[in-house]
């Protein structure tokens, strides 16, 4: 290829990437003005730029695909940095009952919906994961924005989210093996190896996390960023090779890191995560033809209503067991409703493997409904009427 052609191709890539980033910036500003999470608007951007939309990103699509892979790794790494091994252990110990109720209440409807839609068991299982997992990113941001971190119900919400993330650390390796279509013996061996890697990683993080973090620490922000980012990509790549899932590998590494490395790592990686995470949501939307959304809109709405209600019931029940009052129970339940990044991660696995044509469109509709609708419900939780009450009670100091 001549130098002129190379320059032309390079210029086209830069033009497309610049346009995508500016579009995300505009949508992010709109989301901030509306007090909404940016994830659903980024999905819309992907839909507007994908096949069947009249706009094509031919030159930059390969870069966006790789950037999307990096984005999901960084999303899960930053999520892991929010937890310590002790928090994972305590979350499992104190709220495993609510976590189990959550699995059944929000996962089973997804699986049953897939079967009723005539899907094979594998895409139905993926749909169960999509409907089960709440968006830790959206929930954490809402709790912070609304100054509810210190509320009595917040530890219940966070412990259920921790339980969900641990379930995903087991779920993703299993569906990864199933998607590959391995023979029964080979599949069982792969799942065993994957689960063993997860267990070993959790044990290592609990016992040697401080020592590992100490070895990685660097006074220079540049060196620390290069170290953590390089190690993250290596761990994610190794996890993918042993069929654990790059996302789970990144999450487990995040859990392992602690102290100053975790704190400074979050600060340094947050803007990078936001940029590459934006590419991840755009790339998922690009793979969905907008014309395929309307046939799955009603099933997505029905599934959103059912699983939104089951999340509220789970949070209400978990908070009631901790002796929290009705208003706090309602806030806990509504806080679990938003879906987002992890649902898209699971759907992305199925879309990439081509297991079910309607999986991508259904997930896009479902996440759009619950990311936006769930965020609005969380913000107005204190104004919603409680069952059996004509109006919300007036706030009292020290009331739950």
Image: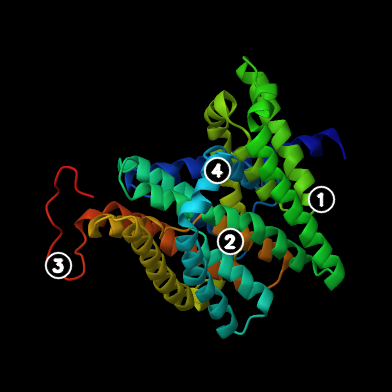
Task: Specify which label sits upstream in the sequence, 2 or 3.
Answer: 2
Q: How many numbered markers are drawn? A: 4
Name above or below for residue 21 compared with residue 102.
above
Q: Which residue is mark 1?
A: 241
Disc on res. 389: 3
Name the residue located 39 percent from the left edge and 72 percent from the top edge.
305
Q: Quadrant of residue 20?
A: top right
Picture coordinates of residue 63, whole percent (x, y): 70, 44
Local packing at callout 2 (Cα closer than 10 Å; few below 14, some 14-19, many 20+) is: few
Q: Which residue is mark 4?
A: 79
Local packing at callout 1 (Cα closer than 10 Å; few below 14, some 14-19, many 20+) is: few
Left or right of residue 374: residue 52? right
Q: Give the number of the mark in front: 2 or 3.
A: 3
Local packing at callout 4 (Cα closer than 10 Å; few below 14, some 14-19, many 20+) is: many
Left or right of residue 196: residue 315? left
Disc 1 is placed on an element classified as: helix
Circles 1, 3 touching at the beta carbon (< 8 Å): no
Circles 2, 1 touching at the beta carbon (< 8 Å): no
Task: Specify which label sits upstream in the sequence, 2 or 1.
Answer: 2
Circles 4, 2 touching at the beta carbon (< 8 Å): no
Q: Give the number of the mark in front: 1 or 3.
A: 3
Disc 2 is placed on an element classified as: loop
Residues at marks 3 and 4, CA–CA distance in whole angstroms: 38 Å
Residues at marks 2 and 1, CA–CA distance in whole angstroms: 37 Å
The colour scheme applied to this rendered structure is rainbow
Q: Give the number of the mark in front: 3 or 4.
A: 3
Task: Specify which label sits upstream in the sequence, 4 or 1.
Answer: 4
Picture coordinates of residue 44, whole percent (x, y): 49, 57
Name the residue located 50 percent from the left edge and 55 percent from the top edge.
340
């Amino acid at each position: 290829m001549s130098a002129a052609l190379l320059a032309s191709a390079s210029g086209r890539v830069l033009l497309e990437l610049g346009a995508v980033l500016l579009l995300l910036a505009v949508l992010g500003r709109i989301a901030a003005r509306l007090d909404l999470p940016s994830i659903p608007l980024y999905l819309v951007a992907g839909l507007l730029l994908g096949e069947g939309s009249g706009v094509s990103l031919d030159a930059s699509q390969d870069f966006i695909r790789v950037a999307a892979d990096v984005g999901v790794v960084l999303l899960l790494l930053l999520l892991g940095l929010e937890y310590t091994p002790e928090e994972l252990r305590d979350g499992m110990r104190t709220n495993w009952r609510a976590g189990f109720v959550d699995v059944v209440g929000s996962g089973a409807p997804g699986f049953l919906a897939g079967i009723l839609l005539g899907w094979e068991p594998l895409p139905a299982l993926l749909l169960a994961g999509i409907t089960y997992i709440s968006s830790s990113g959206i929930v954490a941001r809402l709790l912070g924005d609304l100054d509810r971190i210190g509320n009595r119900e917040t530890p219940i919400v966070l412990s259920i989210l921790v339980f969900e993330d641990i379930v995903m650390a087991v779920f993703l390796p299993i569906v990864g093996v199933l998607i590959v279509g391995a023979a029964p013996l080979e599949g069982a061996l792969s799942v065993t190896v994957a689960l063993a890697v997860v267990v070993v990683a959790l044990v290592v993080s609990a016992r040697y996390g401080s020592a590992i973090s100490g070895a990685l620490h660097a006074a220079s922000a540049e060196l620390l960023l290069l170290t953590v980012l390089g190690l993250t990509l290596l761990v994610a790549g190794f996890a993918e090779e042993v069929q654990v899932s790059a996302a789970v590998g990144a999450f487990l590494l995040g859990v392992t890191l602690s102290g100053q490395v975790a704190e400074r790592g979050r600060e340094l990686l947050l803007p990078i995560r936001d940029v590459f995470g934006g590419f991840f949501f755009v790339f998922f939307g690009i793979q969905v033809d907008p014309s395929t959304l309307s046939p799955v809109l009603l099933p997505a709405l029905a599934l959103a209503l059912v699983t939104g209600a089951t999340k509220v019931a789970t949070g209400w029940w978990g908070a009631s067991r901790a002796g929290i009052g009705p208003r706090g129970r309602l806030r806990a339940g509504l806080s679990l409703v938003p879906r987002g990044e992890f649902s898209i991660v699971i759907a992305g696995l199925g879309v990439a493997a081509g297991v079910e044509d309607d999986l991508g469109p259904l997930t896009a509709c479902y996440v759009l409904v619950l990311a936006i609708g769930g965020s609005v419900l969380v913000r107005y939780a204190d104004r919603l009427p409680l069952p059996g009450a004509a109006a919300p009670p007036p706030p009292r100091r020290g009331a739950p």
